[in-house]
Amino acid sequence: MDIDEIRQRSWDFGLTVITVLLLGTLGVQSFVGTIHVWLAQRADPLWEQTSSAAYIESMNMIAAPQLILLVVAMGLCVPKRLFSRRLLVVASVAMVVLGVGTGVATGSLSTGVSTYLALAALIQVAVIALTAAGAKGPSYLTEGRLTKIGSGLLHLGFILFGIVVASLQQSPFMHPVFWTSTALMTLGTAMSFYADRLAVRRVVRVTPETDF
Amino acid sequence: METTAATTYESLQSLLETLSRIGAPYQFALIALALVLAAIAVVPAARHLRSPALLAATIVLLAGEVVLVWFHYRLWQLAEIIDPATGVAVGRVAVPLWVESEKLFVWALVVAVLGTVMRRHREELLPGAMLFTALLIAGAALSGKPFTEPLPGFIGQFVGYLQATAQGGQAAQSAFQGMYGSMRFYYNTWYMWVHPPLLFVSYGGFALSFLATLVMLAKRHSSFETTAYRWARWGYLPLTFGMLIGFPWAILAWSGESWWWSGKVNMSIMLWLLYTAYLHARLYLRRRGMWRVVAVLSLLSFATLVLTYATTYLVPGAHSYAAIGAPSAFADAVLRVLAGGV
């Protein structure tokens, strides 16, 4: 293993740790939210009528940066070597700045988040297209083209679902975009998990079993 | 129409009595079955009886499910909803087979079936699968009581509708509106026929994943982690799809309600996030010490699953059976502590 590969693996591991931590912090936020709702409703039976709107707004404000960071990590993690790491970091920072700028200019958190997510979706589409075409650029933790395409599809589905939640709930586009995201996430997950069974040419990979 | 309501009410009572006549001894048998399953699971000398015992439990549960299918079919025949203003029948209520008092029973059935068909590390996982099935069976028989106290929410609403229909006037119209709304946006939606069973299938897979993680911690061997992962991915796919399809339904059915970030929704999101974190973390399983992180995430995820299920009955809000202000010693104790008391 050369030094570049070691660096790449450390970078990948760091991004995975960040992803796991962000998923964890969002989980903690959800748990704290549940406890808050439970206790608030016990203390004030009319809480839902009087205070739930402010609570939902606070939760959205706390979740939005975590969601963006999660998608940033996703964007940096999946298309490894498709672009140089430096270019990816610069592009991600530029996308975040553009999203924040749009949010500030329009005065709308959801517009800012959606702008960022739409740009992230474009990158994912490029990654999937290049992977499907067999480009040598994209590198993944997982092996096999079907697994790689599956991973790309489910991440794209996740981003599209984020756009639905952020800004399409009242839009006529909600249903088509939502069902597209659902199909992508489900199909992508199935391909990632069961690529070896779906492949026409099956390669049985033996993982050594060890004691921990 | 008043005559129809009275006749329907009598037929309903007769149906409930018939179910109870079959169900009372069956529920008693379920409790005995749970005890026997648990005993065989923990007594080493009865090891050779484990597979047959779980298979027998699966057959008993399937027989109970057949009775419930018959009950629901008869209920559907009776539950015709008529608009009192026009006298026109607007449809029949098709109550899904996995709501209210039937949830634990369905979960027990899923775990029993998965435990019966599982192959990898069967010998090691079987006692846990049997104990978990026994726990769910006991919960279904002692708490859910789907055969002697079936569908309390639906039966209560339907009887109220029938009584109001017999009275006529504004009460009949109001009861009709409520019943029609429940039929259209809850019981008869395709979503209610797809979302819950998907989640119960995923819960079954996660239960076996949890058991495999416990065995992995005891034996410290990577093959059990692989088994835990395989059951987790079995559970993750229907969990993801099942949760996603709830989104457009929630927007429509809970329009005007504060459902986003409500208790059960929060816990469901947390459940999905933790299993996602688990699946990401295990990509680096071979890294030194990562198996501990993976094991902790697996255990935490399953604990969240149990909490998510419990939230339905504890935390009021959309997607919950808990009533605002319902007595809860635990919640009261937490509030007292937060207020500085004892």
Image (spheres, coloured by chain):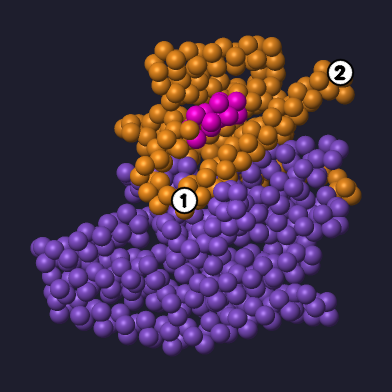
Chain colours: A orange, B purple
Q: Residue furthest front?
A: B341
Task: Check residue B22 in the rendering and tell me which mark sits there, or answer none.
Answer: none
How far from the left and from the top, in percent, is residue A172? 31, 32
Is A21 or A155 nearer to us in this picture? Answer: A21
* Residues flagged by tags 1 and 2 on a common chain: yes
Image quadrant in which you'd find residue B169: bottom left
Q: Which residue is mark 2?
A: A3
* Residue A63 lies within the magenta run: yes
The residue wearing badge 1 is A43
Stretch of the chain drawn in magenta: A59-70
Count of labels in the image: 2
Q: Is residue A120 visible?
A: yes
Main secondary structure of the magenta stretch = helix
Q: Name the side, left or right, on which A39 lies relative to B283.
A: left
Helix, strand or loop at mark 2: helix
Residue at image coords 31%, 82%:
B13
**Label 1, residues with CA under 10 Å away: few <14, some 14-19, many ≥20:** some
Vertical placement of A18 versus B172: above or below? above
Query: What amino acid type should be assigned to the residue bearing mark 2?
Result: Ile
- At a point 32% along the width and 44% down the height, the residue shown is B255
Judge from the rendering whether residue A3 lies leftward or rightward of residue A26; answer left or right.
right
Q: Is residue A131 visible?
A: no
Relative to residue B71, is residue A70 depicted above or below? above
Gap between marks 1 and 2 measured at Cα: 59 Å
Q: Is residue B218 magenta?
A: no
Instruction: Estimate the x, y position of residue B294 in percent, counting from the top left.
Output: 75, 44
Q: Quadrant where the C terminus of chain B lies?
A: bottom right
Amino acid type for the residue under numbered disc 1: Ala
Q: Residues within 10 Å of mark 2 (few under 14, many from 20)?
A: few
